[in-house]
């Protein structure tokens, strides 16, 4: 049993470390309750499968390893942990994109919003009036659009996925409804 010596504690990650908070700062402990990385960050997140944890220092987000060494220096306005596909959502210049575990931008920060990648390898995004799901290369897989003032869903080949009817019928229905 670990004594309740912290203001905040999260679950243990696969690497055996748990995020803890004390006095408004965050760090990490091991399963014995020993401080491994002292509470020093303005914000933090659990360690992901690739062994990195998102932290915040001086108002910017970066990533550390299990020894507390800075792997990707704090430089982002916002960030999330790494997904199973090895990409992490970041925010720069008010836009969202994705980096790999070395900090290399894989998908440029061009989305007005973008979520973390899910188990299916897709992430929700919004860009230039489009919203839908993107793959790990930043390509639209499925997105919302409008045909004859009617909401529709299209795939990466710009083919209609929903509703399952010809575009001509959609436009005829929209004209009739007016």
Image: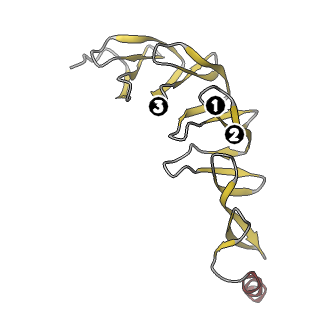
Cα distance in 3D space between marks 1 and 3: 17 Å
Q: CB of mark 1 within 8 Å of CB of mark 2?
A: yes
Q: Which label's residue is closer to the chain start, 1 or 2?
A: 1
Give left or right: position of 131 versus 13: right
Give percent across and percent down for residue 145.
Answer: 72, 66
The answer to which of 69 and 79 lies nearer the viewer is 69
Give left or right: position of 77 versus 85: right
The quadrant of the image that shows the C terminus is bottom right
Mark 3 element type: loop
Residue 90's place in the image compared with 144, above or below, is above
Instruction: Rate crowding at label 2 as few (under 14), some (14 to 19) or many (20 or more) other CA atoms within 10 Å.
Output: many
Q: Which label's residue is closer to the chain start, 1 or 3?
A: 3
Where is mark 2, residue-wise?
96
Instruction: Name the quadrant containing residue 59.
Output: top right
Where is mark 3, residue-wise?
48
> Label for residue 78?
1
Looking at the rendered image, the disc whose residue lies closer to the viewer, 3 or 2, is: 3
Cα distance in 3D space between marks 1 and 2: 9 Å
Task: Name the residue: 56% across, 45% down.
Answer: 117
The answer to which of 26 and 88 lies nearer the viewer is 88
Residue 142's place in the image compared with 85, above or below, is below
Instruction: Name the quadrant containing residue 58.
Output: top right
Give percent across and percent down for residue 26.
Answer: 46, 18
């Amino acid at each position: 049993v670990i004594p309740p010596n912290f203001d905040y504690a999260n679950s243990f990650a696969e690497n055996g470390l748990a995020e803890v908070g004390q006095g408004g700062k965050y760090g990490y402990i091991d399963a014995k309750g020993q401080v491994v990385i002292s509470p020093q960050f303005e914000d933090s997140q659990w360690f992901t499968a690739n062994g990195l944890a998102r932290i915040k220092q001086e108002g910017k987000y970066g990533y550390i390893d299990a020894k507390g060494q800075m792997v990707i220096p704090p430089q982002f306005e916002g960030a999330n942990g790494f997904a199973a596909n090895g990409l992490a959502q970041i925010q720069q210049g008010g836009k969202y994109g994705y980096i790999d575990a070395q900090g290399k931008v894989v998908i440029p920060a061009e989305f007005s919003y973008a979520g973390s990648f899910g188990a299916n390898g897709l992430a929700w995004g919004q860009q230039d009036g489009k919203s839908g799901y993107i793959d790990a290369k930043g390509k639209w897989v499925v997105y919302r659009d409008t045909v004859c003032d009617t909401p529709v869903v299209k795939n990466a080949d710009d083919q209609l996925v929903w509703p399952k009817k010809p575009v001509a019928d959609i436009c005829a229905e929209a004209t009739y409804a007016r």
